Amino acid sequence: MKLTGVRKKKGDDGGCFAAALAAVRKFGGVLEHPWGSHAWAHFGLNKPPRSGGWIAADWEGGWTCCVEQGRYGHYARKPTLLYACKTALPELLWGHSAARLDPEVVLRMGLKRAKRLGEVGARGGGTDSTPRIHTPAAFRDLLLGIALSANAKADTSL
């Protein structure tokens, strides 16, 4: 939900994803999107396996993978789709990780309730809250490294 209380509609991003995808294809770089995103199917991108590994995303030279931000310091697993074009494709920390329960939540609510709530249930704030959408510094640095490796010979004409 937006702050206005109006529910977002699927694909209602004002063309932002389409523009970002076109820019990455033209200039090189990397996009990240939540695992549950419908953008991959909408734009005809191959959906990578959740277990990880780079696969061809399209016929435009793009590559895609799924990686969990929890392996880079996020408190939840937070599976994330990456789309890269004209960049290095580094080996990442692939695969499913085990759920990690917050020790403070276990202490406060007990193990049984903490398991029922899961990794993010007791953090509060809903899906758009700062702690849930936060990108860990290690993951940010990884994305910047991929983006900075973009091919210098990419088409820069406008």
Image (cartoon, rainbow, N blue to C red):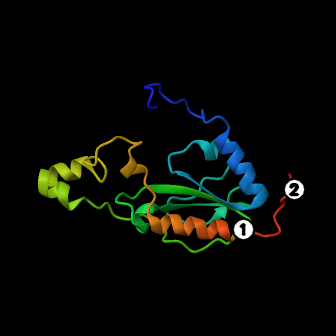
SS category of the residue bearing label 1: loop
Task: Check residue 150 in the rendering and tell me which mark sits there, or answer none.
Answer: 1
Question: Seen in the image, is 125 located left or right of residue 142?
Answer: left
Q: Could you say which quadrant of the image residue 106 lies in?
A: bottom left
Task: Report the mark closest to the observer, 1 or 2.
Answer: 2
Picture coordinates of residue 153, whole percent (x, y)? 83, 68
The reply to whether dot 1 and dot 2 touch (C-beta < 8 Å) is no
Most foreground residue, 13 or 96: 13
Q: Residue at coordinates 65% horizontally, 34% vertically from top-left?
A: 14
Q: Residue at coordinates 54% horizontally, 69% vertically from top-left?
A: 142
Picture coordinates of residue 139, whole percent (x, y)? 49, 65
Q: Could you say which quadrant of the image residue 126 lies in?
A: top left
Picture coordinates of residue 155, whole percent (x, y)? 84, 60
Q: Residue at coordinates 43% horizontally, 54% vertically from top-left?
A: 134
Gap in Å between the C-alphas at discs 1 and 2?
16 Å
Task: Check residue 16 in the rendering and tell me which mark sits there, or answer none.
Answer: none
Task: Check residue 157 in the rendering and tell me which mark sits there, or answer none.
Answer: 2
SS category of the residue bearing label 2: loop
